[in-house]
Image (tube, helix red, strand yellow):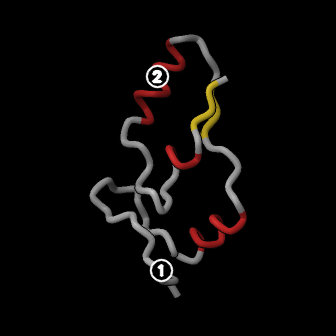
Amino acid sequence: MVKFASCVNKSNYHGPPCPHMDYLKSLVRRAGLEFEEGTVLSPTAQQRREKGYYNDCDNIEDECLPTGKNKE
């Protein structure tokens, strides 16, 4: 079992999700292994994500450092 950590496949204060996730998953599949995306998200990190503390990092061009601000 290969576990891709949340910091690799979700946006967070470290940066955007890994732009190579699809490739990495294909390598794991080709090796005949199972994989799981994400580890446990801490309640604090999830609250910060919901409040807009982290920028939306779906686009690799986005700045993904903490905004320190709420979306409200």
Q: CA distance from mark 2 to mark 1?
A: 36 Å
What's the amino acid at mark 1? Gly
The first of marks 2 and 1 along the sequence is 2
Residue neighbourhood size for the residue with mark 1, other residues' Cα within 10 Å, grouped as few (<14), some (14–19), many (≥20): few
User: What residue lies at 50% left-to-right and 44% top-to-bottom?
Assistant: 8
Q: Is residue 20 left or right of residue 11?
A: left
User: What residue lies at 41% left-to-right and 43% top-to-bottom?
Assistant: 18
Q: Is residue 18 left or right of residue 60?
A: right
> Seen from this angle, which residue lies furthest top?
31
Residue at disc 2, secondary structure: helix
> Seen from this angle, which residue lies furthest bottom?
72
Horizontal and vertical percent position of residue 37: 61, 38
Q: From the image, which quarter does the N terminus lie in?
A: top right
Question: What residue sits right under mark 1 in the picture?
Answer: 68
Horizontal and vertical percent position of residue 14: 45, 57
What's the amino acid at mark 2? Ser
Q: Is residue 63 left or right of residue 32?
A: left
Question: What residue sits right under mark 2 in the picture?
Answer: 26
Residue at disc 1, secondary structure: loop
User: What residue lies at 61% left-to-right and 16% top-to-bottom?
Assistant: 33
- Of 6 and 26, nearer the camera is 6
Q: Name the mark on residue 43.
A: none
Q: Is residue 72 above or below residue 18?
A: below
Asked if disc 2 and disc 1 are in contact, CB closer than 8 Å, the reply is no
Horizontal and vertical percent position of residue 55: 43, 69
